[in-house]
Amino acid sequence: MNTRRIGAAALVVLLGGCSLDVTDFDVSDLRFSKKSSNKAFVVGDEPYAVRTAATLISQGGNAVDAAAAMYFALSVTYPVSAGLGGGGICLVHDPKTHRNFEFDFLARSATSNGTFAVPGAVRGMAQMQTSFGALPWQRVVSPAEGLAAVGFPISQALAARLSAASDVVRLDAGLAAEFLDESGKVREAGSVVANPALGETLAAIRVQGSDALYAGPIAERIAAYAASQGGAITQAEIAAYRAQRSKPLELSMGETQIALPGASTGAGIFAGKLFAEILRAELAQSGNANTEAAVVEGTKRALSGFAVSDLPHDLGATGFAATDNSGQAVACAMTMNGPFGSGHSVPGVGVTLARAPASSTAGLASAFLTPVLATDAQGNLALAGAGAGGPVGTASIADALARLAKGEAVTRRASNAANGDTLYDTVNAILCQNDSCTALPDAGASGLGMAP
């Protein structure tokens, strides 16, 4: 079978000894969109959410509409890593102004310093879609509402994460009711599941906008449940949440212009250190030396700044990207700060609450979120992608960008597969070279890349 790989190093990071094993991602022809002069693509970790996004573009939506629709769909079909109770960060390239914009909406710790975080993702997606979307808000939310209300088959992507997080699922009544079978085992891929309570919450968000989650009965239920579990979030804190729109960190790597999250947001801290402080210097010193070696060394040095001896196997994060034929591009990375976040779903509303960032080492997930946009010397899109889940995803994106900057081909024949014992680090990217684009999902996952 003809296989291809992202020219991005999959770094198996053993933080205890800070050793790195470098392999490359294999991507089957069955899971990526072939090169095309078409510039509209979507890519992500969960196939049903990706297809939802592609459908929105085919129906007249733009890349921002597709990204927002993918997020809401992921909250239903991939809740282990994206949910209404979580947060994230997105970058948008506006072709009209040739400017990049950053939207920050990480879930934040409550003043009580409890286990549960104040949700941010719905506010952030609403702000981004209102600013740059082409379709009515209702069109963006309704596909996810249908998936939750009517049901959907568990994908291979979700099944893998469910199996790994089975202990979390068993401890929550809402998650158990949806994802465990009559014998108490995690449902297998292909099993049809539904979440009517989440469907009703999405219906309210569709009709009332993001305020439906942040004010009124839904916010009241979230606050009451959090208080009953000893992780108080007040209604005032929920209502006061605001996403932030800012200018991203922008830097040059050769003739490639790169936009990535600014370190002040709390997201992209690792990426900023790797890209801005280390990788460019490594490449400058090494000249035409091996790109992977420079990424490995840069990653080791970036990791040395984190006072952590180990990371959880699953940080509860995911990344995705979308582009359209107008030149608009979006890269997003989302996290629940652990698989299914806190592992608590609010009865009656179907919202699983993210874990507060400071409540465990899983809170480091935001530091490794790496949505990235890159343009070439002519201002054309070269890459829209995201690494999420840990340092592997960030390093893989860094490797792809370094190759672009050096004029190297970013896709090439595969020779070996990625180690199966890695963290749930994923990298999904849309790559454009020589006036053609390719959507490449992470080969270590079961996602999808496709053209509408």
Image (spheres, helix red, strand yellow):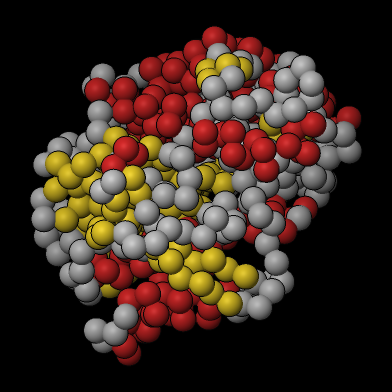
Is 95 drawn above or below residue 252 in the view shown? above
Instruction: Give how far across and how far down residue 281 sits, in percent.
Output: 37, 84
* Foreground residue among 207 and 185: 185
- Residue farthest toward the bottom in the current orientation of the protein: 285
Q: Is residue 276 left or right of residue 414?
A: right
Of residues 371 and 263, which is closer to you in this image? Answer: 371
Residue 220 seen in the figure = no
Q: x, y percentage for residue 224?
A: 82, 26
Residue at x 59% of width, y 20% of height:
191
Residue 183 in sight from this viewpoint: yes
Quadrant in the picture for residue 81: top right
**Image location of residue 242, percent across then percent down:** 56, 40
Residue at 26% of width from left, 48% of height from top?
Answer: 2
Quadrant of the image occupied by residue 402: bottom left
Residue positioned 32% across, 23% down in the render: 56
Q: Looking at the rendering, in which quadrant would you find the C terminus?
A: top left
Examine the rendered structure and indicate whether residue 400 appears above or below residue 42. Answer: below
Locate residue 315 relative to residue 372 in the image: left or right: right
**Left/right of residue 135 with respect to residue 347 in the rendered view:** left
* Residue 323 in the image, given as x and y percentages of width and height: 27, 40
Residue displayed at 37% across by 84% down: 282
Nearer to the camera, 370 or 185: 185
Q: Give the residue furthest to the front.
A: 1
Q: How many marks?
A: 0
